Image: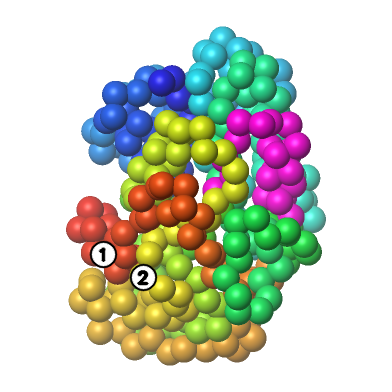
Amino acid sequence: MKLFVTGVGGQLGHDVVNDAVNRGHECIGSDIAESYSGVADGSAVTTAPYIQLDITDREAVATVIKENKPDAIIHCAAWTAVDAAEDEENKSKVDAINHLGTQYIADEAKAVDAKMLYLSTDYVFDGKGTRPWEPDDKCYAPLNVYGQSKLDGELAVSGTLDKYFIVRIAWVFGLNGKNFIKTMINVGKTHDTVRVVNDQIGTPTYTLDLARLLVDMVETEKYGYYHATNEGGYISWYDFCCEFYKQYGLSTTVIPVSTTEYGLSKAARPENSRLDKLKLVEAGFTPLPDWKDAVRRYLAEAKL
């Protein structure tokens, strides 16, 4: 299978290319940088074919996709700076990347009859209640600009294609890029105490595990909406931080606080990020491993 992967300079795109190439698929990576700009770890992504692509350039997207004619496109590229998305000067950029760029890719996927897998987020929901969100729940009133832009991207894909997967994820961490674990370990090394919210509930997602699932998906025709995070139950960011501090060996005290008490975020955050993943099992896909095991493997690889 010939795959085209966007956003390979980020956490997830990096792992998707590696997984796909290691399975023997032909894989082309793309991002906005002139050349691959992720970690130079000697893995497949650093030597796989790479194409510079600005997904907000409709003509460039059309040219690249038509010239390469992939069988499937895994669309990892996105604006993910949630707080910066709230700034007035960034709102049009966020829409151009997460919504319009996704529409351009969906249009070209249709033109070459390629499958498309779009990565979305729990932020498309309103973040209320305690019931886990199911993949086919209707999305209303995202809490912030980022969430609305990702929902608009979902609608672009589902409104254009029949052969699509929309996979919502949450609390992502991986080797290639910034994430909560890296940030908090660095903070914990220089502080005796840290404050972490304990009223936002969800489950982490390790990109190495997720990449395997995404390639599994595009090898099938089991299209539709899915939710994918690591297994191990629903936790708070406080619980998450306590666990990876323990595994890393940090003695920093973690103080649980409410979102209101924390008070540093520009964008509203969902309290309920619980994602129901039963549909994965029903479709015959292998669930992601327990999140604590994922943290252990990540810390061994990341060498923070």
Is residue 131 a member of the stretch shown in magenta?
Answer: no
At mark 1, the secondary structure is: helix
Q: Residue at x 76, y 51 (%)?
A: 91
Q: How is the image coloured?
A: rainbow
Residue where numbered disc 1 is placed: 293
Name the spot of residue 288 as percent of width and height, x first: 36, 56
Q: Residue at x 74, y 43 (%)?
A: 155
Q: Earlier in the sequence, mark 1 or mark 2?
A: 2
From which residue to which does the magenta span run? 148-167
Q: Which mark is residue 218?
A: none
Name the one closer to the observer, 61 or 170. 170
Name the spot of residue 190 as percent of width and height, x first: 33, 77
Q: Amino acid at mark 2?
A: Gly
Residue 239 visible in the shown view: yes
Q: Which mark is residue 232?
A: 2
Q: Is residue 195 above or below residue 156?
A: below
Name the one closer to the observer, 164 or 46. 164
Name the spot of residue 152 as percent of width and height, x first: 74, 47
